[in-house]
Image (spheres, coloured by chain):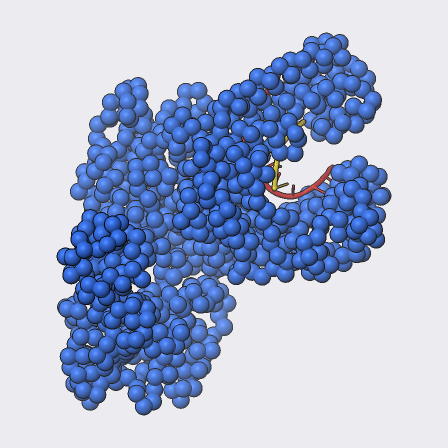
Chain colours: A blue, B yellow, C red
DNA sequence: GTCCTCACG
DNA sequence: ACGTACGTGAGGACC
């Protein structure tokens, strides 16, 4: 039955990883109906495999076939160069569990399925190629990976299944400018950013091919490097010789892999219908099962339409039964123990990590310890920076007993942290990766339980670890207060006793791991995997980098402003006291209310819930038509606000080391998907008032650089026009009209060229009102017109734009039915209050109407931010700040136009291709030495 | 800690 | 019948 591989045989080798990734990206995140297991990639993989086998049947059918997979993340190339493939992005979490299933699928098709520990699939393919060719057979490699092109020639061709194209010797020459036998020479010079092969800096494929063709081979080129005319190129080749030679060894495939099977084992075999259909049925692939059953002329097994089972009842119960037992938490002091932990981590491919530090501000925090957890209930803590006495780790204090050496610990952890193929699970990853960055460690390959919770439960509750642990694990973690106290007597973590720290820190890692296990299947069940994978997880390093950059703020400017404000306030205060007839604290609303309404007897004093008079700006404004005092108080309040919140407070936030202000962005702060900014909040720097706007003059670019502000024009209204399907609004946006004027024209029948500012202002207020879930009362208050008149405007608006009312009604209906609303990208915002009765129902309704619009805008700018670093990588520019619909950059003077063009393009195209908008997105640009000028 | 007020989109 | 524009964070007063 079995024949010996030889002349006339034709071996097809399928690059398994390529199939898997193509399948994963080509298909939506499908899940198995009965239990929510992600199976999109498996489904695509099976389809592709089946179609391939089907498509190759005929005259030149393969006699032998195999699917070759990678195994393990560590190969002999990592021993040569530890940075090899270190840039690889972490595997999406919903793909990981599908990998073993693709092996199972291959076997179910009765196709040979081969892999080797320590070798890449490419090496196995290379070895098989050589063997097959030596035996006189032919080979077709099914892959489009350029690393395999070196194997082409002498009966070996490649088939790019994506483009349905054969790649032969000419194809390789087209791609590399040299024949297959010189491909590795070109690759060694050109390097490869994807695999992190260094190559020769400044030399790409074109130049490399030119050089190789001129000198014949890489070795000759390097030997005769002195002869090269271009000085820069000559220098590079001489200085980087070793790096280039290393690169060649990295790209050269090993054709002597010690295989544990022979070519004869790969002989093509018919699948066993029972096994194959059994597997497909188990995966619950209805269409595919039926199609293959037909092809095999067999009976398709029945796939029951099982209702989803209770969420992993069995598994969950097991995990939840594992107690939180501090005795299973160990304190690691010996590097050998850590090495054992690392071996386990590498083996299983993931670990939960938490860092303990001396401060909440990552820019000034020192690392005190690291905790790890590899399975529920099991965790360790590595103390490295605990101190005794006064002073800190790097000055004054004594290092406490019983710890691991700081540098030893980090040098052991570094390769794991930087290896994107090992998943590091954090609660609030941004904090920890910034801490590790302080020590030159760039963490790659992260999961974040805080972001998972946000993607799953935004609007339902907060996403802090204590709350999540209590809610989802039924466990109250040790409060940090018990270790460091609170208030004035608070100590830093380095002063905490190592034993206590171990219990606390190990528990945090344990909890993080358990939350990850709990949330992972939920992401699929709730269909928010895409949101988490595309909108949340990739944003973390981007925000970390922006925070690290900070923005330059001029202390002198702020300090001068503070002084000027103080003087003016003192004068106003004197006047106010005189008008009041007594001295009082102008900053106390309570005292002010009593003075105005009780003592001076102003009309219209209204007490709120707490029994205090309301003294808000709107009330003082009304009073100021009758009295002098309220106007003075308004002026005083404005200055007080500017001084305390901005000109004084901002100075305190200037980092002494960098001279810049480093805000912190909270990714989970706003339910709609917006970011929020704290410490300091740089998203509410004044701009509306002339006095306040001047604070932006203190935000500057360093010498030789410029600030560039890019902001989306009317993004929320554009989204509204799209989602509500308002043709006239869409048309106005497409034609670049003044949207508020166009609205006014449509509503009041005033031609555009006769528009008055007053009518336009009213239309503008209505436009904004609509986004907020308009009410007659709210619009009346905003426009200071009678409520009936405001209601008349709204009625007319709905009449002219009937789609708006439908959109609002539909959104509320959807929210009531599902208790959440969605953005265009599928972000869910839960609206539990929509079921409430009474006044709360009104709030919830308006929030539900607003959330998809505000949230979609937030998603769009997030996508822009995620794509931005790569887009501007070659420009001398940094993205510094985000203010909801604006991005602020710092750019070298000469590159301003390039930056604006590139960044604008990224922003304007960021809705696509995930969603389609019927209206264009337009980004306005400004530049200047200060943020004030850039607007 | 909570309320009030006010800065931003 | 009720009280209302949506989403945030920070500072100061007051308990």
Above or below residue A550? Residue A603 is: above
- Residue A417 lies, in percent from the top left, at 30, 46
In this rendering, does residue A108 appear at all? no
Residue A295 sits in which quadrant? bottom left
- Residue A845 lies, in percent from the top left, at 68, 49
Q: Nearer the viewer, residue A420 or A242?
A: A242
Q: Residue at x 54, y 36 (%)?
A: A928
Q: Nearer the viewer, residue A49 or A633?
A: A633
Q: Residue at x 34, y 81 (%)?
A: A53
Residue A800 relative to residue A478: left or right: right
Q: Nearer the viewer, residue A635 or A620?
A: A635
Tell me the quadrant of the picture where the N terminus of chain A can be found: bottom left
Residue reaching furthest to the front? A229
Q: Residue at x 65, y 19 (%)?
A: A587
In this rendering, does residue A95 appear at all? yes
Tell me the quadrant of the picture where the C terminus of chain A can be found: top right
Above or below residue A586? Residue A614 is: below
Residue A224 relative to residue A193: left or right: left
Residue A593 relative to residue A538: left or right: right
Above or below residue A373? Residue A614 is: above
Q: Nearer the viewer, residue A862 or A118?
A: A862
Residue A808 relative to residue A832: left or right: right
- Residue A531 lies, in percent from the top left, at 49, 55
């Amino acid at each position: 039955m079995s024949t010996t591989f030889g002349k006339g045989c034709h071996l097809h080798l399928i690059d398994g990883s390529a199939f898997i990734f193509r399948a994963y990206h080509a298909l939506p995140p499908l899940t198995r109906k009965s239990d929510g297991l992600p199976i999109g990639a498996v489904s695509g993989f099976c389809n592709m495999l089946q179609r391939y086998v089907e498509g190759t049947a005929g005259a030149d059918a393969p006699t032998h076939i195999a699917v070759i997979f990678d195994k393990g993340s560590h190969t002999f190339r990592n021993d040569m160069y530890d940075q090899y493939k270190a840039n690889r992005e972490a595997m999406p979490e919903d793909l990981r569990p599908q990998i073993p299933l693709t092996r199972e699928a291959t076997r179910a098709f009765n196709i040979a399925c081969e892999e080797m520990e320590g070798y890449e699939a490419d090496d196995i393919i290379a070895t098989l190629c050589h063997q097959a060719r030596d035996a006189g057979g032919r080979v077709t490699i099914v892959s489009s990976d350029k690393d395999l092109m070196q194997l082409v020639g002498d009966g070996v061709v490649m088939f790019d299944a994506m483009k349905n194209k054969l790649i032969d010797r000419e194809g390789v020459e087209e791609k590399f400018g040299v024949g297959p036998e010189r491909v590795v020479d070109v690759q060694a010079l050109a390097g490869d950013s994807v695999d992190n092969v260094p190559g020769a800096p400044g030399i790409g494929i074109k130049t490399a091919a030119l050089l190789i063709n001129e000198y014949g081979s890489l070795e000759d080129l390097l030997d005769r490097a002195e002869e090269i005319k271009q000085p820069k190129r000559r220098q590079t080749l001489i200085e980087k010789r070793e790096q280039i030679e290393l690169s060649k060894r990295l790209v050269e495939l090993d054709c002597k892999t010690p295989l544990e099977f022979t070519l004869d084992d790969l002989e093509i075999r018919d699948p066993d219908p029972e096994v194959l259909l059994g597997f497909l049925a188990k995966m619950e692939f209805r269409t595919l099962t039926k199609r293959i059953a037909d092809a095999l002329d067999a009976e398709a097994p029945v796939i029951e339409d099982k209702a989803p089972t209770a969420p992993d009842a069995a598994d969950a119960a097991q995990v939840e039964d594992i107690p939180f037992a501090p005795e299973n938490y160990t304190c690691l002091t010996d590097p050998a123990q850590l090495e054992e932990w690392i071996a386990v981590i590498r083996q299983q491919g993931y670990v939960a990590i938490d860092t303990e530090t001396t401060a909440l501000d990552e820019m000034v925090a020192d690392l005190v310890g690291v905790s790890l957890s590899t399975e529920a209930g099991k965790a360790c803590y590595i103390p490295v920076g605990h101190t005794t006495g006064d002073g800190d780790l790097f000055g004054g204090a004594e290092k406490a007993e019983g710890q691991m050496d700081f540098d030893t610990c980090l040098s052991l952890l570094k390769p794991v942290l930087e290896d994107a193929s090992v998943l590091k699970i954090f609660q609030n990853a941004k904090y920890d990766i910034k801490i590790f960055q302080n020590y030159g460690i760039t963490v790659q390959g992260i999961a974040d339980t805080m972001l998972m919770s946000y993607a799953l439960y935004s609007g339902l509750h907060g996403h802090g670890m204590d709350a999540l642990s209590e809610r989802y694990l039924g466990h109250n973690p040790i409060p940090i207060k018990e270790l460091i106290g609170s208030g004035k007597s608070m100590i830093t973590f380095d002063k905490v006793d190592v034993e206590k720290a171990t219990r606390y820190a190990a528990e945090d890692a344990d909890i993080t791991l358990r939350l990850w296990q709990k949330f992972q299947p939920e992401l699929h069940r709730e269909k928010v995997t895409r949101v988490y994978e595309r909108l949340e997880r990739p944003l973390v390093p981007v925000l970390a980098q922006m925070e690290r950059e900070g923005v330059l703020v001029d202390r002198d400017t702020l300090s001068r402003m503070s002084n000027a404000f103080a003087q003016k306030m003192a004068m106003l205060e004197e006047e106010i006291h005189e008008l009041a007839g007594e001295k009082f604290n102008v900053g106390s609303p309570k005292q002010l209310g009593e003075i105005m309404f009780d003592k001076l007897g102003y009309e219209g004093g209204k007490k709120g819930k707490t029994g205090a008079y309301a003294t808000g700006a709107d009330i003082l404004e009304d009073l100021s038509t009758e009295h002098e005092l309220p106007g003075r108080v308004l002026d005083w309040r404005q200055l007080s606000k500017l001084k305390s919140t901005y000109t004084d407070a901002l100075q305190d936030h200037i980092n002494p080391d960098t001279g810049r202000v480093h805000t912190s962005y909270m990714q989970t702060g706003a339910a709609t998907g917006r970011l929020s900014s704290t410490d300091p909040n740089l998203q509410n720097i004044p701009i509306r008032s002339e006095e306040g706007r001047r604070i932006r003059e203190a935000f500057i670019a360093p010498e030789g650089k410029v600030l560039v502000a890019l902001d989306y024009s009317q993004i929320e209204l554009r989204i509204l026009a799209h989602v509500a399907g308002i043709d006239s609004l869409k048309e106005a946006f497409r034609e670049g009209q003044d949207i508020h004027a166009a609205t006014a024209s449509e509503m009041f029948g005033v031609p555009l060229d006769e528009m008055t500012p007053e009518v336009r202002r009213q239309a503008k207020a209505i436009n904004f009102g609509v986004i907020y879930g308009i009410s007659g009362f709210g619009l009346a208050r905003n426009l200071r017109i009678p409520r009936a008149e405001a209601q008349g405007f709204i009625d007319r608006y709905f009449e002219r734009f009937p789609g708006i009312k439908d959109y609002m009604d539909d959104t509320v209906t959807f929210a009531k039915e599902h208790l959440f609303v969605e953005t265009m990208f599928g972000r869910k915002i839960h609206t539990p209050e929509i079921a409430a009765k009474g006044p709360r129902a009104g709030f919830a309704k308006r929030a539900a109407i607003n959330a998809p619009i505000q949230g979609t805008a937030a998603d769009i700018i997030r996508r822009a931010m995620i794509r931005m670093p790569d887009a501007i990588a070659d420009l001398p520019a940094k993205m510094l700040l985000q203010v909801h619909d604006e991005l602020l950059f710092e750019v070298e003077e000469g590159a301003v136009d390039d930056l604006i063009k590139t960044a604008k393009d990224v922003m304007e195209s960021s809705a696509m291709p995930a969603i389609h908008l019927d209206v264009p997105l337009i980004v306005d640009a400004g530049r200047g030495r200060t943020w004030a000028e850039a607007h």
